[in-house]
Image (cartoon, rainbow, N blue to C red):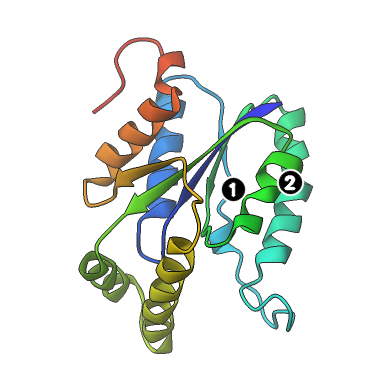
Amino acid sequence: MRDVLVITGPCGAGKSSVGFECLELLDAGGVGAAMIDAELAYFHPKPDDDPQGTRVAEQALAAVAPIYAAAGIERLLLPRVIERPRHLEPYNLETSARECCTYKLEVSKETIAERLSAREVGSALGWHLRRADEIRSNALSHALFDLTVDGEQSVREVAVEVLRRAGWLETIAGRPPT
């Protein structure tokens, strides 16, 4: 059994950056954790009935989660787009989570455009901007998130807030790094 913390938001919200920062904070505090970034699993062609590759990413998570469990890793960080209720199902089933919390990074459309413009080039920029709007619209149609975090803060501040609200900083001896 393990705890799972899903960090979500549209493209450019900072999911991966916050996930890496959380992992660093936990490591500095001597807390074992793994980050599985499903958003970095790019492949083509995607199945016609799975245009974003969601199902394949979920199957990959199901395959690697037991490896981390066997290594004694009890905390999983999962930066991932969640835009429909079915996207949350695998986290309780395939990872045998004792606790799963979903944290949405709330970031303005302007900040997302700025961040995406700094990292994407060519046709990828237009695709990511359109996809960010689509994700935001789809997610608004459902009650999917346990908590919302201000993603406009620094990556460190967001990571500390996410870990604090999840109760994971309580396991770190002393005061969390800031």
Which residue has dot 2 on it? 64
Q: Which quarter of the image is occupied by the C terminus?
A: top left
Q: Is residue 85 above or below residue 96?
A: below
Which quadrant of the figure has residue 13?
bottom left
The foreground one among 153 and 121 is 153
Q: Quick one: label 2 or label 1, which is nearer the N terminus?
A: 1
Classify residue 140 as left or right of residue 54.
left
Q: Is residue 61 above or below residue 118?
A: above
Alpha-carbon span between mark 2 and mark 1: 9 Å
Classify residue 69 as left or right of residue 155.
right
Q: Residue 116 location in percent, x, y?
A: 32, 72
Residue appearing at x 21%, y 46% in the figure:
153
Q: Residue 173 location in percent, x, y?
A: 39, 10
Residue appearing at x 70%, y 49% in the figure:
90
The residue carrying pointer 1 sits among few (fewer than 14), some (14 to 19) or many (20 or more) residues within 10 Å by Cα, namely: many
Which quadrant of the figure has residue 54?
bottom right
Q: Give the structural element (helix, strand or loop) at label 2.
A: helix
Q: Is residue 9 above or below residue 120?
A: above
Q: Mark 1 is on which residue type?
A: Ile
Q: Give the structural element (helix, strand or loop) at label 1.
A: loop
The image's mark for residue 36 is: 1
Q: Mark 2 is on which residue type?
A: Val
Q: Residue 60 location in percent, x, y?
A: 73, 56
